[in-house]
Image (cartoon, rainbow, N blue to C red):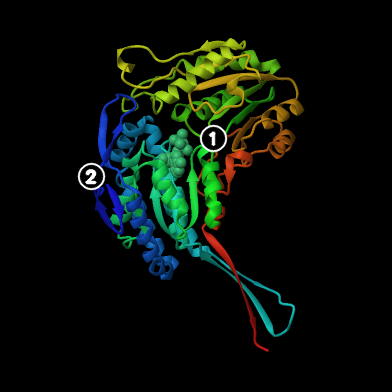
């Protein structure tokens, strides 16, 4: 259903679309497909709600966000199952995502109280200079399917805490989880029009948001190609933009690393969500002296990974989102093998009756990966771990930075000086030092280069929803 001006509704056209379970091919539910007209109604509702929402105190807005967080906290089990049915990740991972999604609501509920300004020493004794921060206005939020609720609260929580109102267009692959977040806000009593939800054709709804002069900012998480398109379109009305785009994370293992920890980290960072996150490792660089040992230990640990329907107990690797994702993953393996890579584990689609209706790919390790392979520069978004060898620190820094992307990176070493040297030299927005899971609500998340613009999370994340106003008083 669509949610416009506080009311749940079907689309006027009566059109709808199916949500397919990627593990079974079965229809999970059918969702109303909104049109440009409904997107416009949502924008109007958000515009009308803005003057009231902006006037509330931070503490009043805190109460709504906190309540929504509490409602979600009470629904973790059912919500996790829904996420798994809708986009495939194993239930345990879905629960982890819900925890993170709630953290954003909790954290920004509080952070809204700390939108401080400044006073600045004046150049004249009769003047006083003041800086205040005000919400940018109505926000358009476009979100992906891979974290179908955390990517929403990561945007909505700071936007609402700052005093902005929102039109949300979630991914057409995961509209049901999005509805659950909006339901929690609705049940928390958020005033009509403050949050609006429109499902529908990505370009049609996207264009309505991009062309509207009412929308003052677009916050987007998704592919670099679509992000670039949105930045181009934002120019016409000079919108602010926040872009969380693709990544191509290097995972660097030095010979002085704790190897068991590095292997555990590589598995967490590469195979979480079946490799479908923008911070997933895409290239594992291992120092030559330990590469065989690392590959051997990685393969041994991977033998424990279980592929299957994420609803089943013990499954670690769920399906990929759709057939396109399988084709891309497979093409990266075929291309790498044709250029000299050796498959030491996995390497193909998962066979068998239980997997025939879903989009399953075996977790894979490739040895002897080289720079000319697609996997070295295109984002795979699938469960394939290519191992590249390197000799020196300088060499690996250069190789790790040799990409258009700059989101997450990981280094494993026990040498303190190297931790500083390498993390400062990497052209990435995030560096995990012996830490494969750095994302938390209170820290900045975002990339450099073609991985995006702006930061989400922490005190940095709310700045993107605020304008800075300078007020100069002269009482001469
Ligand atoms: P992914 O490959 O992760 O689905 P996309 O960038 O295609 O990444 O999608 C991320 C979000 O962007 C989804 O909500 C999708 O519907 C939306 N989207 C895709 N194309 C457009 C577009 N042309 N305009 C606006 N939004 C779009």
Label 1 and label 2: CA atoms lie apart by 38 Å
Seen from the viewer's position, the closer of residues 238 and 25 is 238
Could you say where residue 224 lies in the image, as x and y percent from the top left? 54, 38
Q: Which residue is mark 2?
A: 14
Q: Secondary structure at mark 1?
A: loop
Q: Secondary structure at mark 2?
A: loop
Earlier sequence position, callout 1 versus callout 2: 2
Left-right relation of 47 to 280: left
Can I make out residue 70 in this image? no
User: Who's the residue at 58% across and 31% down the image?
Assistant: 248
Q: Which residue is mark 1?
A: 279
Q: Which label number is shown at residue 127?
A: none
Left-right relation of 43 to 433: left
Q: Ligand 1 appears in which quadrant? A: top left
Could you say where residue 311 lies in the image, as x and y percent from the top left? 31, 28
User: Who's the residue at 36% across and 23% down the image?
Assistant: 314
Task: Give the quadrant of residue 392.
Answer: top right
Label 1 crowding class (10 Å Cα cut-off): few <14, some 14-19, many 20+? Answer: many
* Above or below, comparing residue 299 to residue 82 in the picture: above
């Amino acid at each position: 259903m669509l949610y416009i001006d506080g009311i749940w509704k079907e689309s006027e056209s009566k059109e709808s679309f199916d949500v397919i379970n990627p593990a079974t091919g079965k229809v999970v539910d059918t969702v109303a497909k909104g049109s440009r007209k409904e997107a416009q109604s949502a924008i109007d509702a958000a515009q009308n709600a803005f003057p009231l929402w902006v006037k509330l105190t931070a503490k009043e807005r805190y109460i709504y966000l906190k309540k929504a967080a509490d409602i979600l906290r009470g629904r973790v089990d059912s919500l996790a199952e829904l996420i798994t049915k809708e986009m495939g990740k194993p239930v345990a991972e879905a629960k982890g995502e819900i925890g993170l999604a709630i953290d954003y609501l909790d954290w920004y509920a509080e952070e809204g109280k700390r939108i401080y300004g400044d006073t600045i020493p004046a150049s004249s004794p009769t003047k006083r200079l003041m800086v205040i921060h005000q919400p940018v206005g109505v926000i358009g939020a476009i979100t992906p399917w891979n974290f179908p609720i955390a990517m929403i609260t990561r945007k909505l929580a700071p936007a609402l805490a700052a005093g902005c109102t929102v039109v949300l267009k979630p991914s057409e692959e995961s509209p049901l989880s999005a509805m659950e977040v909006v339901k929690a806000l609705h049940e928390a009593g958020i005033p009509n029009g403050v949050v609006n939800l429109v499902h529908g054709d990505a370009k049609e709804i996207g264009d309505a948001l991009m062309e509207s002069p009412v929308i003052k900012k677009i916050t987007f998480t998704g592919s670099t190609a679509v992000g670039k398109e949105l930045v181009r379109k934002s120019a016409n009305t000079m919108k602010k933009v926040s872009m969380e785009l693709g990544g191509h994370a290097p995972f660097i293992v030095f010979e002085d690393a704790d190897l068991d920890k590095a292997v555990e980290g590589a598995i967490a960072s590469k195979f979480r969500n079946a490799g479908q996150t923008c911070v997933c490792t895409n290239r594992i660089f291992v120092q030559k002296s330990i590469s065989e040992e690392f590959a051997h230990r990685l393969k041994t640990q991977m033998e424990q990974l279980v592929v299957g329907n994420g609803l089943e107990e013990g499954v670690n690797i769920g399906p990929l989102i759709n057939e396109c994702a399988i084709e891309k993953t497979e093409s990266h393996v075929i291309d790498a093998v044709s250029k000299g890579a050796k498959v030491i584990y996995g390497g193909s689609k998962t066979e068998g009756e239980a997997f025939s209706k879903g989009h399953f790919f075996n977790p894979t390790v490739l040895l002897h990966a080289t720079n000319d392979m697609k996997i070295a520069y295109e984002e795979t978004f699938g469960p394939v771990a290519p191992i590249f060898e390197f000799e020196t620190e300088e060499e690996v820094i250069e190789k790790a930075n040799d990409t258009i992307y700059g989101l997450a990176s990981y280094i494993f070493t026990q040498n303190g000086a190297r931790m500083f040297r390498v993390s400062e030299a990497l052209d990435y927005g995030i560096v995990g030092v012996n830490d494969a899971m750095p994302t938390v609500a209170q820290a900045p998340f975002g990339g450099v280069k073609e991985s995006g613009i702006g930061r989400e999370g922490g005190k940095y994340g709310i700045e993107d929803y605020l304008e800075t106003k300078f007020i100069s008083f002269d009482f001469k």
